[in-house]
Image (cartoon, grey):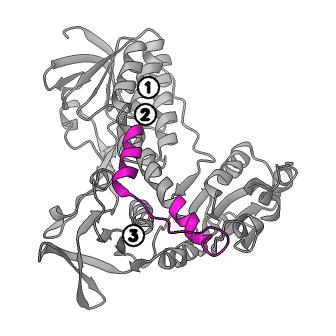
């Protein structure tokens, strides 16, 4: 490929695919490259396969909650069959994604890429390629663990491909990945422990609702050890022994499997960014507010690879990819609007958030906070669920500043609050919505 491309996209995940198609549709010559199968983390190694496995855990949990309320018989997860169910979704994705790109006029390349100059990139098996613009949308990877024996831990990708589920599992880290996978594994019959070095888990979520989640997690059989700093992992009778420090004492726990759930970092260290004069910040590409490299104007970045204000979420990656593409096409400096982006921890039940935390909102001035334990409401009663709650934060004028929910179906319900925040609606306007009854949405009006 000796011609100069209008755009080379590095990373065939949601951000990269969205940008590549948009620019190709506008008539640009576009190529996209990835060393991994096309589809990215969300479709292949994250959100989607995780939720496929969660479906089995939800069903088993639902049956157990109603075991003395009309549902008889033991609910049991067949892990290999559940994994095949997951693969029925993930297996066709790479070919489907690549076919869609080709149909859009995008050249699809496979191999590891690295920059060789400010306007050139080298791809294994394809040689050096010149470009007018490049979009770095390489996503994220597990944060390196820096203690002896850390290589004994598997990452989230490996967990989502387990052919059999071990009996004893230890998760390192107290964030999304550990809690979501722990809830799946516990419902599938594993003995699960979460080791978190922090005093507080899931720090980006409302602490009152996190406390509810911790209670619910323990009720599901998950042990949570806070302020536990891993020291080493070593072999122990054909299994693993995880030694951690809590307080001034070292303790140990044996496990058949150790899972790395201690966060992710931008996956850009293999791109030789220095060769293109691309500066980094917080591990990702340093960008302007309109997602252009702060040091090389040919380069843009989107999604987890960009050190932007956006959260590391798929919807953010998609709209960042589209905005970066539009800015390249039109030579504009349009900035992404991150208002009203919801975030969910898909535990059972789920924990959701959009907008400000209570402490953030109080710093802006006078606010009203409505915190309600909804565990006794009909929406939970019919399911036998014991834990649920809502915290809604509004300003003096009734504008919704933040919404925090924990309960069944609340991952769907948070979208109502997301739209309200996006459009600047007041609590009275949202309460005036006539919702179908009985549904989770019909609870909204009583949460204020």
Quadrant of the image occupied by residue 238 = bottom left
Q: Is residue 286 visible in this depiction of the protein?
A: no
Q: Is residue 386 left or right of residue 258?
A: right
Look at mark 3 in the image and give the residue it sits on: 189
288 part of magenta stretch: no
Q: Most extreme residue toward the bottom, as rendered?
A: 248
> How many numbered discs?
3
Please identify the quadrant where the N terminus is shown: top left
Residues rendered magenta in the picture? 59-88
Please identify the quadrant where the C terminus is shown: bottom right
Q: CA distance from mark 3 to mark 1?
A: 42 Å
Q: Is residue 360 left or right of residue 391?
A: left
Q: Is residue 444 above or below residue 20?
A: below
Residue 19's disc number: 1
Disc 1 and disc 2 in contact, CB within 8 angstroms: yes
Task: Residue at 38%, 75% (x, y): give it.
Answer: 198
Q: Is residue 352 visible in this depiction of the protein?
A: yes
Give the percent coordinates (x, y) of residue 65.
Answer: 59, 71
Q: CA distance from mark 2 to mark 3?
A: 36 Å
In this view, the mark in front (2 or 3) = 3
Say which of 188 and 100 sits in front.
188
Give the percent coordinates (x, y) of residue 283.
Answer: 30, 50
Q: Is residue 85 above or below residue 92?
A: below
Look at mark 2 in the image and give the residue it sits on: 15
Task: Residue at 42%, 20% (x, y): give it.
Answer: 100
Q: Is residue 192 left or right of residue 200?
A: left
Say which of 43 and 92 sits in front.
92
């Amino acid at each position: 490929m000796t011609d100069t491309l209008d755009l080379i996209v590095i990373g065939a995940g949601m951000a990269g695919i969205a940008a590549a198609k948009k620019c190709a549709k506008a008539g640009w010559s576009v190529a996209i490259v990835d060393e991994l199968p096309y589809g990215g983390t969300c479709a292949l190694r994250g959100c989607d396969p995780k939720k496929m496995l969660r479906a089995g855990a939800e069903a088993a949990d639902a049956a157990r909650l109603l075991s003395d309320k009309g549902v008889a018989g033991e609910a049991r997860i067949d892990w290999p069959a559940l994994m095949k169910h997951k693969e029925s979704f993930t297996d066709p994705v790479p070919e489907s994604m690549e076919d869609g790109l080709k149909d859009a006029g995008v050249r699809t390349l496979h191999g590891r890429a690295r920059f060789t100059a400010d306007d050139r990139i080298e791809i294994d098996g394809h040689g050096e390629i010149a470009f007018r613009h490049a979009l770095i949308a390489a996503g994220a990877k597990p944060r390196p663990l820096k203690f002896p024996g850390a290589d004994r831990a598997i990452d989230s990708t490996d967990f989502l491909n387990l052919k059999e589920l071990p009996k004893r599992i230890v998760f390192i880290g107290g964030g999304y990945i550990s809690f979501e996978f722990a809830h799946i594994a516990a419902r599938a019959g594993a003995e699960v422990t979460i080791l978190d070095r922090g005093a507080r888990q899931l720090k980006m979520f409302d602490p009152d609702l996190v406390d509810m989640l911790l209670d619910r997690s323990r009720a599901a059989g998950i042990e949570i050890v806070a302020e536990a700093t891993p020291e080493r992992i070593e072999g122990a009778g054909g299994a693993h022994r995880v030694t951690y420090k809590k307080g001034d004492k070292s303790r140990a726990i044996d496990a058949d499997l150790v899972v790395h759930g201690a966060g992710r970092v931008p996956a850009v260290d293999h791109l030789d960014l220095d060769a293109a004069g691309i500066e980094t910040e917080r591990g990702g590409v340093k960008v302007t507010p309109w997602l252009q490299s702060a040091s090389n104007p040919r380069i843009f970045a989107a999604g987890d690879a960009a050190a932007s204000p956006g959260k590391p979420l798929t919807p953010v990656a998609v709209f960042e990819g589209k905005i970066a593409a539009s800015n390249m096409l039109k030579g504009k400096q349009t900035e992404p609007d991150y208002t009203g982006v919801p975030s969910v921890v898909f535990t059972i039940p789920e924990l959701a958030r959009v907008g400000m935390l209570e402490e953030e909102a109080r710093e802006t001035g006078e606010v009203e906070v409505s915190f309600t334990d909804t565990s006794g409401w009909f929406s939970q009663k019919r399911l036998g669920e014991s834990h649920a709650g809502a915290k809604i934060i509004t300003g003096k004028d009734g504008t919704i500043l933040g919404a925090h929910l924990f309960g069944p179906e609340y991952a769907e319900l948070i979208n109502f609050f997301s739209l309200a925040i996006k459009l600047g609606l007041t609590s009275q306007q949202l309460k005036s919505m006539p919702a179908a009854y009985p549904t989770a949405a019909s609870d909204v009006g009583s949460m204020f």
